[in-house]
Image: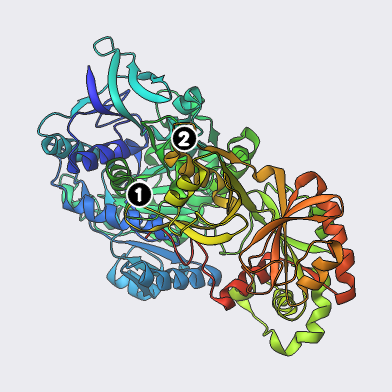
């Protein structure tokens, strides 16, 4: 048996990928599932069906808004006992002032995300949207127009039906066909092996893993990291309520008339099921299941004690539910929780092997669209950096880290998250060589790519006397994870000199006779320049979006260093390898772990640096946008005269084993000028004041 692409997993995500590939012209598609391809054993069949069309994430909102429109547009799946799409909208309600403020922020974000939302009072919500609510139990809510309630199985069936039509009947769907392995030859996926004797081997060019909570099972076998865990999630359906007796249980249109309500402070939600109410709760201990232990079904037995808190809160919010004495259905269903909360999409290091794991029903439409675009054209409409399969560092797929962070993500699934909030646990996963020195200065650290990165230095509080009238105070949300010290560090860098820990800057080396040609092709600016020159440039997507901005320095005729952020280091290196020549003319080496880095900036930066080296660092001897090796003590240091802070200064790249001697030499030399050590807070505001762009915030692939 042969196919162009085999999709493993016929749930809503796999069906969406098949539909979008067929829509983009793919024909020979095979969709497999180990169970029934419509009522499959995964999360799709038991998911309560909520499409949450607005969140604090732009990408997830794009996916959800698109998904809602897609699900609405699809013809119903016939014959079927349920409607596939119910345009009910959805409401998040607040029982605390902090949550009400967060919903106001969400409403503001909806304007830039092009989503239709409305803030409503309790009385408005009860009168216009949901009469069962107790208006005295909450402060207000946000109505999201495109949120909806759907039948996952009906949608999967409809997507499969339409994909078959779009492929001119050439797409095949096979249930009860468990995949046992993916055949790989010379680094490329060549076939899918199954336990079905009628089709033991399906030769193909592409394989898509849409197995979600089972994703790591094949992933681990193939050496493809898919860092996610499965979590049990409680759901109950009450017996019929008198307040809902007017709804006809035989009429599919009456299955749900009211919007889904999410009481996110207490981590539960509820929806109508004809004359009953379904309640889903995250308000319980983390019930973790390793993907290898999930087995044949995503369902588990209900655990009654875990539901008590939710049920008591529900009785307050919906008084009529007190008449329910029993549940007509109760279970613990499983959902996938990726280590950072985003889908895991893209082509793995095995050519032709793609992942579409870690997604929920809400985002399945957008996931299918994005992956199909990526597989067909090489890029997607939306910026997928947060969902890229190569975004993970190795430590993120270790058992301890994965369990700790995923447990935390489950317990805080609806938690209010501040944009500047660092990861609470685990901490000290990675330590820069300068950590001890910054610790001695009483530094407040944040987390970045696992590193403990200086945010501000408490000893610089003394500078507030100097700059008190220039650093306005903040309060409330704006003051969280912030200190006035950051403003003082900013101003002292402008007026004097400051030392920054830049170890979170990654370095890729390109060497070989074809290095200049390759780097020039990879980058948008001209990089075939004189040895010792530095250039600021971009990587571009096929449609001209900014895939990454970076600096490039030329160390020799056949050697270049490319500087990117540690946060996207794995993804960036994968991008480089994707376009590297295969004739042996170029060697790519990730040397990031071999070098630490310090930033020395400010009007007195040259005076400090000149005290610790005999090399010429004058403007004539060391012009802007040049780089060269200098000596600081016994350490060879690659000094790059660039500035993201907008002041005179250098990035100093130091062999990691000699890091402290260079820091200490600079620190001692800086005493004459009362040079400070500063943190990322000041670094960010310095670049903002200067107007320097930040990739991922100011520029990106869109």
For label 1, the SS is: helix
Q: Are marks 1 and 2 in contact (CB under 8 Å)?
A: no
User: Vertically, is 201 above or below 85?
Assistant: above
Q: In terms of sequence position, does the residue under pointer 1 or pointer 2 come before the other? A: 2
**Residue on which the image places disc 1:** 363
User: At which x and y percent is residue 165?
Assistant: 11, 37
At x 88% / y 67%, what residue is drawn? 669
| Residue, far bottom | 469
Q: Alpha-carbon distance for marks 1 and 2? A: 26 Å
Is any part of residue 700 visible from this angle? Answer: yes
Tell which of 605 and 667 is nearer to you: 605
At x 17% / y 29%, what residue is drawn? 171
User: At which x and y percent is residue 671?
Assistant: 89, 71
Q: Relative to residue 650, is residue 548 drawn left or right?
A: left
For label 2, the SS is: loop
User: Vertically, is 230 above or below 313?
Assistant: above
Question: Which quarter of the figure has residue 203?
Answer: top left
Q: Relative to residue 672, is residue 641 drawn left or right?
A: left
Q: Quadrant of the C terminus?
A: bottom left
User: At which x and y percent is residue 679?
Assistant: 71, 66
Circle 1 or circle 2, nearest the eye:
1
Q: Which mark is residue 302?
A: 2
Q: How is the image coloured?
A: rainbow
Tell which of 495 and 389 is nearer to you: 495
Q: Relative to residue 42, is residue 166 drawn left or right?
A: left
């Amino acid at each position: 048996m042969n196919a162009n692409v085999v999709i493993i997993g016929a749930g809503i995500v796999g069906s969406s990928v098949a539909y979008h590939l067929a829509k983009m012209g793919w024909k020979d598609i095979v969709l497999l599932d180990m169970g029934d391809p419509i009522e499959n054993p995964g999360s799709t069949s038991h998911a309560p069906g909520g499409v949450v069309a607005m969140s604090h994430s732009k990408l997830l909102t794009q996916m959800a808004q698109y998904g809602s429109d897609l699900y609405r547009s699809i013809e119903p799946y016939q014959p079927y006992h349920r409607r596939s799409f119910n345009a009910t909208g959805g409401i998040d309600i607040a029982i605390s002032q902090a949550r009400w403020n967060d919903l106001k922020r969400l409403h503001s974000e909806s304007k830039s995300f092009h989503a239709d939302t409305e803030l409503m009072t309790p009385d408005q919500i009860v009168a216009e949207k949901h009469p069962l609510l107790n208006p005295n139990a909450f402060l207000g809510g946000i109505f999201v127009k495109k949120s909806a309630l759907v039948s996952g199985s009906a949608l999967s069936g409809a997507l499969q039906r339409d994909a078959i039509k779009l492929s001119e009947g050439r797409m095949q769907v096979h249930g009860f066909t468990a995949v046992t392995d993916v055949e790989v030859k010379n680094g490329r996926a060549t076939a899918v092996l199954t336990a079905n004797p009628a089709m033991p081997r399906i030769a193909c060019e592409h394989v898509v893993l849409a197995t979600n909570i089972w994703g790591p099972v094949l992933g681990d076998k193939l050496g493809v990291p898919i860092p996610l865990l499965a979590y049990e999630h409680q759901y109950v359906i009450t017996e019929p309520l008198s307040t809902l007796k007017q709804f006809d249980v035989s009429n599919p249109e009456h299955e749900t008339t009211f919007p889904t309500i999410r009481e996110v402070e207490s981590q539960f939600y509820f929806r109508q099921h004809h004359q009953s109410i379904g309640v889903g709760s995250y308000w319980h201990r983390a019930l973790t299941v390793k993907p290898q232990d999930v087995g044949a079904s995503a369902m588990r037995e209900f655990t009654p004690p875990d539901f008590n808190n939710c049920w008591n809160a529900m009785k307050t919010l919906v008084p009529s539910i007190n008449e329910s004495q029993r549940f007509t259905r109760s279970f613990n269903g499983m959902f996938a929780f990726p280590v950072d909360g985003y889908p895991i999409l893209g082509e793995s290091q095995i050519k032709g092997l793609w992942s579409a794991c870690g997604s929920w029903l809400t985002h399945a439409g957008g996931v299918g669209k994005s992956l199909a675009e990526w597989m067909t054209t090489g890029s997607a409409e939306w910026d997928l950096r947060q969902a890229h399969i190569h975004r993970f560092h190795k430590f993120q797929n270790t058992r301890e880290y994965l369990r700790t962070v995923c447990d935390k993500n489950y317990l805080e699934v609806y938690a209010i998250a501040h944009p500047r909030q660092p990861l609470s646990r685990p901490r000290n996963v990675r330590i820069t060589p300068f950590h001890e020195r910054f610790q001695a200065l009483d530094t407040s650290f944040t987390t970045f790519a696992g590193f403990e990165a200086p945010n501000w230095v408490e000893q610089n509080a003394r500078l507030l006397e100097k700059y008190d009238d220039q650093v306005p105070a903040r309060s409330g949300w704006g003051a969280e994870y912030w200190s006035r010290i950051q403003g003082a560090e900013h101003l002292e860098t402008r007026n004097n000199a400051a030392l920054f820990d830049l170890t979170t800057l990654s370095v890729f080396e390109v060497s070989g006779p074809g290095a200049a040609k390759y780097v020039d092709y990879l980058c948008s600016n001209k990089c075939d320049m004189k040895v010792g020159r530095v250039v600021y440039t971009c990587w571009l997507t096929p449609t001209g979006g900014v895939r990454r901005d970076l600096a490039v320095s030329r160390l020799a005729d056949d050697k270049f260093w490319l500087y990117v952020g540690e946060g996207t280091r794995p993804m960036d290196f994968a991008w480089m390898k994707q376009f590297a020549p295969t004739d042996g003319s170029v060697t790519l080496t990730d040397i990031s772990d071999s070098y630490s880095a310090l930033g020395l900036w400010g009007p007195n930066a040259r005076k400090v640096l000149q005290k610790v080296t005999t090399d010429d660092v004058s403007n004539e001897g060391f012009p802007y946008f040049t780089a060269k090796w200098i000596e600081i003590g016994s350490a060879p240091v690659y000094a790059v005269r660039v500035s993201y802070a907008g002041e005179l200064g250098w990035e100093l790249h130091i062999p990691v084993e000699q890091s402290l001697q260079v820091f200490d030499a600079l620190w001692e030399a800086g005493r004459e000028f009362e040079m400070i050590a500063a943190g990322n807070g000041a670094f960010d505001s310095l670049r903002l004041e200067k107007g320097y762009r930040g990739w991922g915030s100011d520029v990106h692939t869109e």
